[in-house]
Amino acid sequence: MNTPSPHPPTTVRTTCPYCGVGCGILAAIDRQGNATISGDPAHPANFGRLCSKGSALGETLSLDQRLLHPMFRQADGSFARTDWDTALSKIANGLRTIVDRDGPNAIALYLSGQLLTEDYYVANKLMKGFLGSPNVDTNSRLCMASPVAGHRRAFGADVVPGIYRDLDEADLIVLVGSNAAWCHPVLYQRMIAAKNERSTRLVVIDPRRTATADAADLFLPIASGMDTALFCGLLAYLADTHALDDSYIAEYTSGFADALARARAIANDAEAAARATRLDPGEVARFFELFARTERVVTCYSQGVNQSAQGTDKVNAIINTHLATGRIGRPGMGPFSLTGQPNAMGGREVGGLANQLAAHMGFSPGETDRVRRFWNAPRMATGEGLKAVDMFDAIERGTIKALWVMATNPAVSLPRAGAVRAALKKLELFVVSETTLRNDTVEAGAHVLLPAAAWGEKDGTVTNSERRISRQRAFLPRPGEAQPDWWIVSKVAQRLGFGAGFAYRKPAEIFREHAALSAFENDGRRDFDLGDLAALPDDDYDRLDPVMWPVKAGAAPGEVRFFSAGGFFTSDGRGRFIAPEPPRTRVATSDAFPLRLNTGRLRDQWHTMTRSGKSPRLGAHSPEPMVDIHPDDASRMRITDGGFAKVTTPHGSAVLRVCIRSGQQRGSIFAPIHWSQSTAADACVGALAMAETDPFSGQPELKATPARVEPVEFAYRGFALTRDLITLPNATWFARVAVAGGHGLLFATNELPSQWQDLAEKLICGDAERAEYVDLPRGIVRIAALRGGRIEACMFFGPSHNPPAWEVVRALFNSGTVTRRDRRLLLSGQSAEGIAETGPVVCACYTVGLEAIRRAVAEGGAANVADIGRALRAGTNCGSCIPELQAIIERTASAVGSGTAS
């Protein structure tokens, strides 16, 4: 397990900070301290493959806008630097005052799946064991709480039964509510490899036709929220066709009769399931038959299932079908939750959710006492705390008076984000541990900013979707006064008088304590057990290879699957069938709000873009906030492709670029979650989402908010490229885009061209040389400032029906010295010999644009994706652009054949 690394000393083995796949990374450091990022071929999660986001990590390591020192907010709203001792004392004194006056329930901690397990552990220990507040929750509540609740109901513990290798060995993979091609691309490529090499069938169930569906053998465009009906119909079909594993049900489970009766009441057969889900009856029957006659089935579910006011019931409806067929815990079969964040599972292991204690224990008297004794805790929380949505409601009401936020941006990501921002201003003490000087949560009124160590600077462990613990190792020095989160929490704890319990000097000490607690009074009764690592020496911790839990003392290490022969963690050791409630949407549409707003991620961005938004490569594919709408809905509402629309819900509104897509379901729209007030104007999708939550998990419904869409007209559109950040007029719609060596802004406005000419003039200062083309009657302004033959700044502005294209100008901005011929090109915005227009980026891994792909097909004879890969490398890394490449090939070949290609 602890073999020496074969890599040279300048190469550090670490783990990706994005999704829950948990890919291994090699960070190679040169003598100048620059990092080159590549996949770790020895890591069993990815075997060297990385997605576009992981491949671009080297572009996100700059200290631009980095928080480097503790800061206090001043009376005028600005921040001033302070020292660590003063900042930590202020936090400790503030927490002590509020707890003494109002009790421990008046303070709260909001954490993140971006934290390392060691950070999470120390934070939970302080709040739940020493300050006595159970109000510790995490942004994992927004993505993984429903699987947690479903697992606990069915299995008696929050355990994923299967492992990634099951995807390689399955004969049928069912993806429910998962755009894995974009959100978990490394795992998706394993599925595609199984499809190509073993003829594994792929079924995709999703209201949207996403890139994931393009490779599916069967795509089921299910009605929003009706997953439970489909899987209840499947359970009834399995019973009627004698496809159940009666011996498994009898020997290892309970509750089957009630679950089957409820399933029949919801959808008694394939036809009833088709009616409830608005699917084709023949396709439903085909799916049911395929599931019934295929033994090796893995059903993967993600945010389309989880982010629902009935998410837990959806999870249990899926699990019911696997328990009923005994297809669980054996090679190539089982229900599999695809985790959203890199350490969502690690956070769950240490009690990061408000309804958990550490080491997968709950708040029963026996479990609470066990954790109290292990920690020697003076003030142990004895009941569940407030889950995320309820926590911020309590802040709004004024019952929570102190909040500490770590490594997340709730003022953007939570539903009703506008109300969240307003609530945060009411706090008596508002602390934010962050890496960035600016984000929406900081701007919402934080009193104290603490500079936290970022990925590449911190040291500890994370746990991925298959229960595999990996080391995240530091390969960069911590800048300024940045410190690890566990260090910050420990220092506050010491100032509160809890020094003996928080005398940690290194993360290895925390990990050993965490492992020891998992084994404390366990005796096999709890799923989570790291007993064999509880005495891990520092050197072995430093060298720790990826290892899958459980790792019980005295047991041989290995990849453990659960429940093939029972062994559930319920009181009687039996798996539980759950009878779900009939599916329904919590809030109905209306004449005022006739559509359903579905939210989610894009291929190349992550959360609120604090990290991924710094990469020029990642910003090139989808640079602007947008809304997807079906052509019929767009036509009815007089909305045009590429134009703008205002999306309004009862909770807020946003103005977004329009993408008309036939794969979007009628009556539903989709908008990505990534943009915020810091990165765009009027584009925070979290502000639109309703705050209805699942009664078991507390996870909010982020997929079905009633909404309406109206066209928005802008007379002019343009872009600016600058070396330094600039601010546009207040009435301007804009989106910030990362570009190499500077900053990009895409904007739209109704302001007159003359006012924009005045703004453009301000970009030219000092000895800068001027290049311009201005035609105010036609609404055209193109002004650039050059110094030493290099573009320092430029602003292009034109009529909305014929906006300036920025790909060529951006290439010149990046290219260094601009020749005389390039200056003419600069002002024309057209391509020329030597600077071929790339068009919008399709492959972010290798920055391959649309025009290059079209030329490879039309002129280079590329006939398929493999040909494109050989010619341009596009699609040969993470593969998430392959569906788009295929569509471009088909369109271009068709145009060439008809003689319409340019």
Image (spheres, rainbow, N blue to C red):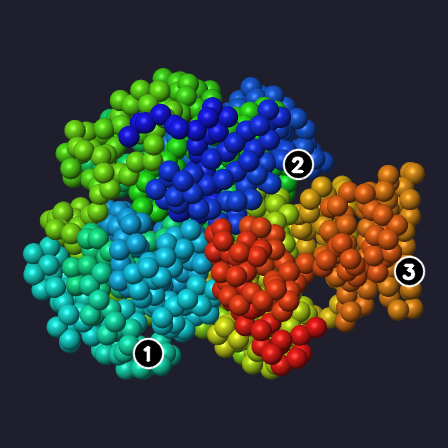
Q: Is residue 867 left or right of residue 781?
A: left
Callout 3 amino acid: Val
Q: Are marks 2 and 3 in contact (CB under 8 Å)?
A: no
Q: Quadrant of the N terminus?
A: top left
Q: Position of residue 310 (x, y in %)?
A: 35, 63
Callout 1 amino acid: Glu
Q: Is residue 457 left or right of residue 130?
A: right
Q: Position of residue 164 (x, y in %)?
A: 31, 49
Q: Look at mark 1 in the image and give the residue it sits on.
A: 283
- Choose between 613 and 196: the one closer to the eye: 196
Q: Position of residue 247 (x, y in %)?
A: 7, 61
**Label drawn at residue 774:** 3
- Choose between 684 and 734: the one closer to the eye: 734
- Choose between 577 and 284: the one closer to the eye: 284
Residue at 72 percent across and 43 percent down: it is 742
Q: Position of residue 97 (x, y in %)?
A: 48, 28
Numbered disc 3: secondary structure? strand
Q: How many marks?
A: 3
Q: Look at mark 2 in the image and give the residue it sits on.
A: 64
Residue at 23 percent across and 28 percent down: it is 532
